[in-house]
Image: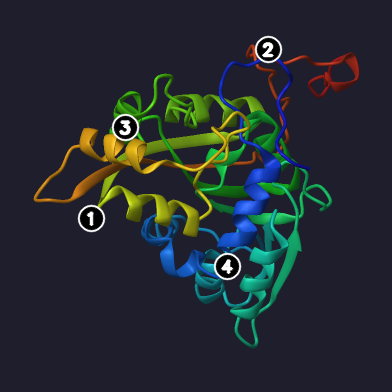
Amino acid sequence: MPPTSAPDADPTPAVDPAALRRALRRAAPTYDGAALLAHEVEGRLLERLELMRVEPTRILVVDARGGAGGRALAKRFPGAEKVQVDPAPAMIRQARKRRGWRRRQHFCAAWSGGLPFPAASFDLIWSNLGLPWANDLDAVLGELHRVLAPEGLVLFSSLGPDTLAELRAALPAGYSRAPDMPVFLDMHDVGDALSRAGFEGVVMENETLTVTYPDLRTLLADGRATASGALLANRPRGLLTPRRLAALEAALPREDGLLPVRFEVVYGHAWRPERAGVAADASGTARIGLDQIGRAPGTW
């Protein structure tokens, strides 16, 4: 199901699911060639995976995009069955084209908040830069917890609140009322959400990666090619005028003639415990029914 949020319940700017799916459809042919940040982060996720003792038999890749993560995991775990999921059928078609022969890979168009799989289906769940576009992180993590087998691992990357700080600071120069931009969650908030979903052994870390662009047009074109452009429900309609573009460009800092753009990358992993616990709600409260309360052996 698409990401959703209750009306008037959260002032955080919401991603428009229809806009996201359209952007993914348009970017499907260009994504793998343009997603330099995603590929760099993917390599760093793989390095972290090397440090973990896991031998999964079934792997789920959510928000798979062009399938690069699935192909990398197919090399790392050649005997495992891989299922790649993305909300855009066009992305799934691209991933299927590039899967290679003799690879145990399957593909499915679905949102990460509504996965069409039975509970405890996978030993490893992988998500590279898909979580930033989820309006309801608790719902997505709850779904990942549901389909992850006991003692299974979820490994992911996301974006933190310092992402695109330069562009955020420049917006007032081009707009009388600066448009909203996505608000990416702090790694501590993501860690808390993992705990609420019932995960254990949560580990979070972050780092800042800087990508340089020759000009603002190239930055915006890169956003379109990677389906990370204007995706908010309340985004400004209409074209970016030359005057506004020039004002924004003038307000952006330069280093050696290039525009430096920061991305705060968040990495996390967690485990589903062998015995499923009780997930807490948004307030941190776990409600346990009488039928869930066990008694110690030898007691009444």
Disc 3 crowd, CA 10 A, few/some/many (<14, 14-19, 20+): few
Towards the viewer: 148 or 69: 69
Q: Is any part of residue 63 visible from this angle? A: no
Kind of residue at disc 2: Thr
**Which part of the image, by quadrant, shows the C terminus?**
top right
Q: Is residue 184 left or right of residue 232?
A: left
**Contact (CB < 8 A) between labels 4 and 3?**
no
N-term-proximal mark, 1 vs 4? 4
Kind of residue at disc 3: Ala
The residue beneath circle 2 is: 285
Q: Which mark is residue 223?
A: none
N-term-proximal mark, 2 vs 4? 4
Judged by depth in the image, the label closer to the viewer, 1 or 4, is: 1
Q: CA distance from mark 1 to mark 4?
A: 28 Å
N-term-proximal mark, 1 vs 3? 3
Q: Is any part of residue 24 visible from this angle? A: yes
**Contact (CB < 8 A) between labels 1 and 3?**
no
N-term-proximal mark, 1 vs 2? 1
N-term-proximal mark, 3 vs 2? 3
Position of 188 relative to 101 (above/below): above
List x then y, in percent, for residue 237.
57, 36
Judged by depth in the image, the label closer to the viewer, 1 or 2, is: 1
Q: Is residue 241 left or right of residue 81?
A: left
Position of 284 relative to 20 (above/below): above
Q: Is residue 3 left or right of residue 253?
A: right
Kind of residue at disc 1: Pro
List x then y, in percent, for residue 291.
91, 20
